[in-house]
Amino acid sequence: MLSDPFLAFALGCAAIAVVLLVWYLAVRPPLTRATKLVLLFGIGLLPIGTAANGNVAGYHATKTRVFCSSCHVMTPFGDDSGNPSSTSLAARHGRNEAFGDENCYTCHADYGMFGTITTKLGGMRHVYEYALHFHQLTVDEALPRIHIRTPFPNATCIRCHSTEAPGWRRIGDHKSLLDRLRAGTVSCASDGCHGPAHPFARVAHIRAEQAEAAAAAATAGAAK
Amino acid sequence: MTRLLQVSAVLTLLGLALMVWSMVAPTPMPVILAMSVGQLLGTLAFGMFGYAVLVDQVRKQRVKGVAAAARRAAARHAAAGSGAAGSGAAGSGAAGSGAAGSTAVSSGGTASAAAGAAAVQPDGEASS
């Protein structure tokens, strides 16, 4: 944990600030210039150091797969993408060193100048949804209901797969769909192409749809 | 002010606790709490500290100002007294000469000690 320099600095600042403040509260010295200086460090400078470095450390922490899977309904997604024997698109990317432990964030982060901000705002929506709608559900109950809010943008894939490499262009489907792939009208993750990145979730959706259709048919049959 | 600073110190400790919790257990709830409530508490505590120090400083300046004014007034009084006493010691025995001496020393404005003023004042009073 202390290998992260931001984290180590933040914890160090916090520890010194706590010592100074506990000393002030325990000893209750008169408000001299020395006391003010001690409090300036204990209430001001050191906590600011903790907050600033803690924010950076927290920001790094929010990009990790462990963080994403810390909500129980996300556990299967994290487990699959970190599984070395899984053949899903997410797991194959997760095994790539460029993605590593931050593979959720790397694929789901928005692209562009304000991508980080919009991604974090989207993350707050996840927290809201989890707290109000998914917190009480079991994983099996939640899985059919979890879906990506907007279709996965091809721009995210094109960040690495530039569509310019000769090897990529040699593939017939890529060549024939080049304009539509770049325009985003055909998704890289569509069923006929690479398929969904988390196939078990797609299976859960299909099963839920089938069960719903069967229930509707049964209700219609009973009404007749 | 001491009470304010104690509250400020406690708020800082609470804020720091939230921040450290988010670093030790980086899951969504601690991170969100640290980045919102923790920082709010820290900012509030620092504001309270700043306010307490400012009020203390203003109070000290005011006390210093009052003391300086008192010293100046005492010095003026002392100067007036010594002028009057001087004229009395010259043995003129006239009230008018004491008043003239007082005016002469006041305009010079050289005397400064309050203690001196206290020592001289009875003479001045006696001479007038």
Image (cartoon, grey):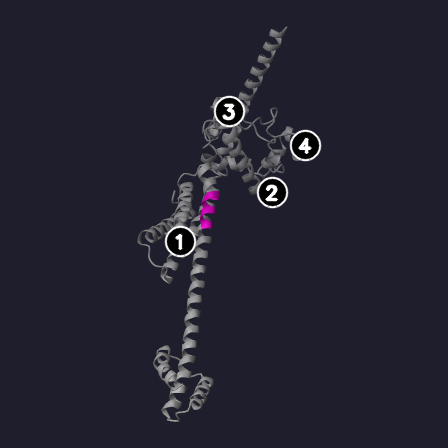
Which residue does the numbered mark 2 point to in the structure image? A112
| Residue B63, placed above or below residue B80 | above
Residue closest to the eye, A162 or B88? B88
Q: Which residue appears farthest toward the top when viewing the image? A: A224
Tell me which segment is drawn in magenta: B35-44
Q: Amino acid at mark 3?
A: Ala
Q: Quadrant of the N terminus of chain B?
A: bottom left
Query: Residue A171, located in which quarter of the rendered image?
Result: top right
For mark 2, give the secondary structure.
Answer: loop
Q: Disc 1 to disc 3, how far (Cα)?
A: 49 Å
Rate crowding at label 4 as few (under 14), some (14 to 19) or many (20 or more) other CA atoms within 10 Å: few
Query: Are discs 2 and 1 both within one chain?
Result: no
The main secondary structure of the magenta stretch is helix
Label drawn at residue A39: none
Residue drawn 42% across the image and 46% down it: B15
Q: Amino acid at mark 1?
A: Leu
Q: Disc 3 to disc 2, how far (Cα)?
A: 31 Å
